[in-house]
Amino acid sequence: MSDTVIRVENLSKKYVLGHQKEGSSSYKSLGESMSNGAKSLGKKVLKPGIKKDFNPSSQEFWALKDVSFEIKQGDRVGFIGRNGAGKSTLLKVLSRITEPTSGSIRIKGRVASLLEVGTGFHPELTGRENIFLNGAILGMSKVEIQRKFDEIVAFAEIEKFLDTPVKRYSSGMYVRLAFAVAAHLEPDILIVDEVLAVGDAHFQKKCLGKLEDVGKQGRTVLFVSHNLAVLQTLCNRGIFLKQGSVFADDSASEGVSIYLKSLEQSASKNLLQRTDRRGKGQVRLAQVDVSPGEDYSSTILATGRPARFVFHVTSIIPGMSCNFSLYDQHGQPVTNFNSATNSQEDLNIPELGMKLICEIGELLLVPGRYRMNVAITTNGELQDHVEAAAILEVEQGQLRGRPVAIGTGYGSVCIPHRWSLAG
Ligand SMILES: Nc1ncnc2c1ncn2[C@@H]1O[C@H](COP(=O)(O)OP(=O)(O)O)[C@@H](O)[C@H]1O
Ligand SMILES: [Mg+2]
């Protein structure tokens, strides 16, 4: 008997663009169509007979193209790829939430999934009822579920709300319960898509610990996360999807490394032409200029020197903020900058135009290459998210007179310091 638990052969999934879509996407998002609509408002009255969502350029779009792979029992597979690569579509197809257009899937065992959009929860039912409902869907007996019940409730930290309909839950509570149910009901295959982005740090840590346990029990885990460091820790295998096709199927660390190289290549591309973005799209990131302080002729930074980042956007909206993170060459997060958290040193310059500027007095990064992901939000709502919007090259430099060496293997950060020595 083979220990293959999932066999996917020539799987393809077609969407017809111009039709109603779920969730955010890299193509024409709801936000974008709304802002386009708003622009033309007053000038144009909708002609009778033309539906609001009519799209003359309606066309087919293949979210998955001829995907084939096999997964063995106990594999912990991380699916890697940019926004819009087809990761969620693949997990939805594997969870039988959406039908493939062609190809075949064979799955052995019980599947529990925790996906971006929706879960197996019924909004009108209470937390308690949903736990039993999900267990029943997974084919568990009432006694079996009962045995797991307390553990699930404790893990989700929702004791007080057990008899409240889940539609009243906050998004955090909802995700906590959904994760607890999926992870504790002993599925043979656990599918988790990007949910860890929702909870707080404490809960994320707990989930990762639980996922590790599930993996150690020899269960199969399919996992998607933007946090590549976590993905590499958790997974032994990485499948890199590029525009709906499998581009690499390797160890998790090799998969991530191939992915990061491909991200670097697109960093040089015109940002507005990139379609691998998420968010409502009323504001978009158009360009990022990286320069060492006032010297705009150079784009190379150096340790201990000033750095200046200019984020050009397509419009300025009240309540807008810019949040960017830096990652090292292994995909490990290094640090984050957020204009939404104010400091007295921040400036308001009405005539600045369509840009936001972040200035650093002294760059505390060791020499190397760093990738920058940028998110633009308006009042907490994601408008645009671009991975690898820029690549930073940091050259060797000095920190308060002390030379800082290249990649010592001790991380990315350097801290100004002083020694006292005898003699
Ligand atoms: N329901 C849908 N209708 C039309 N297009 C969709 C739908 N869901 C996803 N897509 C498109 O399919 C592509 C893959 O999306 P998705 O699987 O969500 O990617 P990922 O999870 O890798 O970011 C995207 O271009 C997205 O816009
Ligand atoms: Mg997704």
Image (spheres, rainbow, N blue to C red):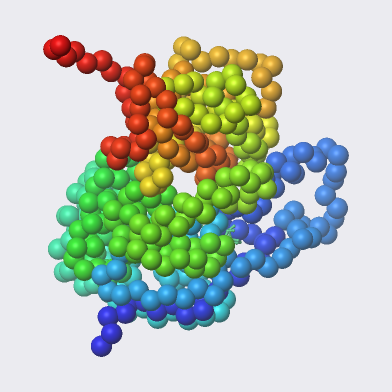
Question: In x, y percent, where is residue 94?
Answer: 43, 71
Residue at the image position 40 percent from the left and 41 percent from the top:
328
| Place of residue 249 in the rendered image (x, y in percent of width and height, measured from the top left) | 42, 67
Image point (56%, 71%), residue name? 65
Query: Measured from the top left, where is residue 50 in percent x and y?
Result: 81, 58
Quadrant (top left, top right, bottom left, bottom right) of the N terminus: bottom left
Any part of residue 128 in sight: no
Q: Quadrant of residue 187?
A: bottom left
Q: As displayed, is residue 277 above or below residue 7?
A: above
Q: Quadrant of residue 77?
A: bottom left
Residue 177 placement (x, y as % from top left): 30, 52
Question: Could you tell whether 400 is left or right of 351 in the image?
Answer: left
The answer to which quarter of the image holds residue 74 is bottom left
Q: Is residue 327 visible?
A: yes
Q: How many marks?
A: 0
Q: Residue at x 46, y 51 (%)?
A: 260
User: In this orientation, which residue lies closer to the viewer: 406 or 333?
Assistant: 406
Closer to us: 251 or 408: 408
Viewer-side residue, 416 vs 13: 416
Q: Residue at image x 79%, y 60%?
A: 56
Residue 272, above or below 312: below
